[in-house]
Amino acid sequence: PNTGQRLAAIYEPGTAEHSLLYGKLARPRDRAQRGNAHRAPEPIKRWQSAVHIVIRDYLQGPQFKYSKVKKGEIRILCLHPGSGNKPLKASLFKRNLEDVFDGYEALSYCWGGPNERNTHEILIRDLNATLPDFGKETHKTNAAVKWRMAVKATGETPFPIRKNLHQALLKLRSIEHDVNIWVDAICIDQTERGKEEKEEQLSRMTEIYNSASNVCIWLGDAYERAGDGIQLVRDIMNFKTFDILIDLPEAKDRWMSLIELMKAPWFGRRWIIQEVALSRNATIHCADHVIHWDDFADAVSLLKEKIEILRNKFRDEIFDDLETSSACILVDILTNVCRKSDDGKVLENMLDLETLVSTLLGFQATYPRDTIYSILSLARDSPQASENWEMLHSSQLERNYHKRNHQNIEWAKRRRLGSAVGLTPNYKFSTRDLFVAFVTRCIYNSGCLDIICRHWAPRVFDRAYNEEVVMPSWVSGMSKAPYGIPGTSLGRQNGENFVAYTPNDQRRRYNASGSYRAKISMVDDPSLDPQETMVHSDRLRTNITDTAFTGSPLPSPTLEKNPSSVIDSITEQTEPSQNAPSYAKLNPNGQAAELTTESQASTVQPQLLPTFENGSRPIPPAIEINALSIPSRSPLPSPNQALQDRSPISPWPGLARPSPSRKPTKTIKSPDVEREHELSGILSVKGFILCQIKEHSDVMRGGIIQGEWVEKMGWEIGQTQNRVPDMLWRLLVADRGCKGGKPPQWYKRACLHGLVDSRVADAEGNLHSLMPADRKISEYTTKYFERVRNVVWNRRLIKAETTEWFRGPLFGLAPKDCEAGDIVCILLGCSVPVVLKRVKGHREISVYQLVGEAYIHGMMDGEAVQDKSLVEKLATDF
């Protein structure tokens, strides 16, 4: 056949190789049937026959040379027969994806830790191997040389793989037949040369997985009680057996064996969501055991329904927090992620990208950008090549172009320039810019600002410089999520997110800004100018080895593009700094002046600022919520001053003096993508000041509410009362029940019981919402204070004085980083109030950073925006 390349070998019809390259691939046999609802099925032996498997990994051996794959083609690996621990051998060949529909299976597995190396190998023959282009020397190359090169190209080449993948292939290969496999770790060129190929293949994940006849889920080979757990799944498919096992004390070990499987590392991988969601059929494999995915999912769902019974019966920590485990979240979301036909074909994706990213917090990706890329194929609003929101960034991109090329951009190139910020897989795009693009797209498309309060962003790390990549404060990191960064801690780390929602229930819990929609714009960021970043590139870095993170006095550091400053880009999971400055002009009278989207506004208009009840005026708000982390209480020089300052001592306290000899920790090879920032981190939105924090409690670590604050909210400690202040019992649960609806009436009585119970309230009046298991109190009091614990954990209680337009004082809950003097604002289009922190800076600049979401009692359901004329009067640009 004419492939456009010089093939190293051509295979005759009738050979096994010819059949692989051009024949129809037979549909694999079923590995497992769904469980019988009336009786437990017989143990199912592992099927040994030809299979096609999808595998994920990221490391290749340098010895293997890929032949180019055409658009629409995929590579398939044909595993040759073998048994036991005999070496793995395979052939690699290319086929059009549409020609192999229903002819292969897909393997989903956990590839290992970040420090794990390729300790095993598989020997691979490339059936599409090509000879090198000899160019003008072709006629000088004799037949013997060409023959030796052809033999070498089509011979077996060692391909290094990791231990877990090696074990999976050993278990899934056939003793008697070839096993045809699609492996993205092997079938996609994962090297630097294969970046474009990888992007194209990733965009086709929906087709690849949905075309597979089955997805084989490999949990691993190291679970001693795997057989017991899988047999339990088979048994409880009969509901009568399930009821018996729930009440049977001797069944504890069997339930624990199932939970151990649910906590396998595979369930925490982000890529597995699409691998299972898009499958038409799936089976779970652990060592030599196999079970149908539907049976396993049903078992997890049943276990979740009865977990409280098991928790109270067995009193073992293995049953704790099971509802928030990745396995339970995965089972819940798969029922809503897409609509399928009876034969498993995907008919419609049901969730938008923002919902998917915001709710799948327990699933990790090795590379932070894959937090978004790994679920694009599942999104209802999957990104297209060019979208309207991209034009939000056109001004900054044109500014960058002008500064670098010393000329204005041509009209014909403007649209193409804007399309460079899209969310389709692009590994030349920095992770920081990808996250900025994602948030601005969410706000533009939905008209809602809630995404800035959702804690979804993983940590991004520029390994070459041993530095953390600084993020805008409105790209909120996972460390603020209820359970923190996945894999770093056990148990609750923070209070429940006030804008949280689930794939099953996407209703807003609050409606502080009423029906107003968010209208945003991006303000040009002067720190992205090449001449500015050239001077400040060392000064603006954040070193992760420091005790405390400090960031740049100007947003978005980047390096000038020159051969001496570019390095390999490797990203890992570290937490982005959340604080950053924004710039606003003040007029001579100290009033905030509106800043246009141009970097230098030609005219400014004064904004009306409210007056607090004590007669003082708040500090004028910044026109933009700040984008990047900066050292608090540090003077900020103007851009011109910053450029002129070259003294050996840093003018900003808290920032180390940059070393002139600073060098990357890795060998310079290619541009460091993580340091090439193109998008502004300065977001402009409309809103108004609601109140200013006057005082706050200590951080409520462990869910302990200080007695003095219980008194401030109306309760008299030490006295027996039959009435609890309405604000007190409502505020402690953020005026919502555990499922996000209005709190039940009995919450009030349960709060009263706790206030007078010495097992909840100590001698100083402190309320202990987290109670030991052996401290038995009434069921409903326990449920109420469980809700209190989930709300107040690691937050502060605040008392705030209002502006002249609202009645105060106001009480509420705010992030642990809030301080007296911070302002609480209603941003139009945001369902909850937010706390903004002023960062002291240059006298001509007012700077705020986003601290986080807040609960302000009596202001969560649109009370502050009922008077439309007042909103128009107070609204200003932040």
Image: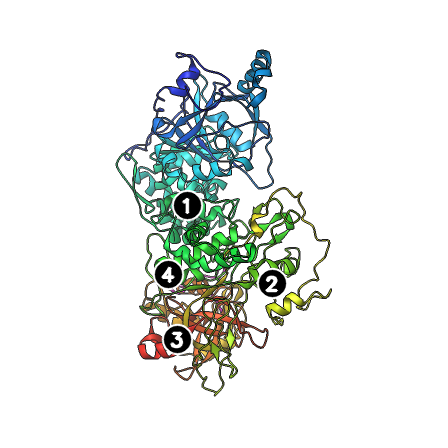
Q: Residue at left 37%, top 79%?
A: 873
Res 180 → quadrant: top left
Q: Are marks 4 and 3 in contact (CB under 8 Å)?
A: no
Query: Looking at the image, is mark 1 or mark 3 earlier in the sequence?
Result: 1
Q: Amino acid at mark 2?
A: Ser
Q: Which residues are magenta?
A: 767-781
Which of the two discs, 1 and 3, sits closer to the camera?
3
Q: Quadrant of the N terminus?
A: top left
Query: Looking at the image, is mark 2 or mark 3 earlier in the sequence?
Result: 2
* Residue 247 visible somewhere in the drawing: no
List the residue tagged with mark 1: 375
Q: Amino acid at mark 4?
A: Cys
Mark pair 1, 4: CA separation: 28 Å
List the residue tagged with mark 3: 875
Q: Is residue 73 magenta?
A: no
List the residue tagged with mark 4: 738
Q: Nearer the viewer, residue 474 or 409?
A: 409
Which of the two discs, 2 and 1, sits closer to the camera?
2
* Residue 187 visible somewhere in the drawing: yes
**Mark 2 neighbour density, 10 Å: few (under 14) some (14–19) many (20 or more):** many
Q: Quadrant of the C terminus?
A: bottom left
Q: Amino acid at mark 1?
A: Ile
Does dot 4 land on a helix, a strand or a loop? loop
Name the residue furthest left: 342
Q: Main secondary structure of the magenta part?
A: loop
Q: Amino acid at mark 3?
A: Ala
Q: Which mark is on residue 552?
A: 2
Q: Nearer the viewer, residue 552 or 594?
A: 594
Q: Are marks 2 and 4 in contact (CB under 8 Å)?
A: no
Which of the two discs, 4 and 3, sits closer to the camera?
3
Q: Is residue 778 magenta?
A: yes
Res 721 → quadrant: bottom left
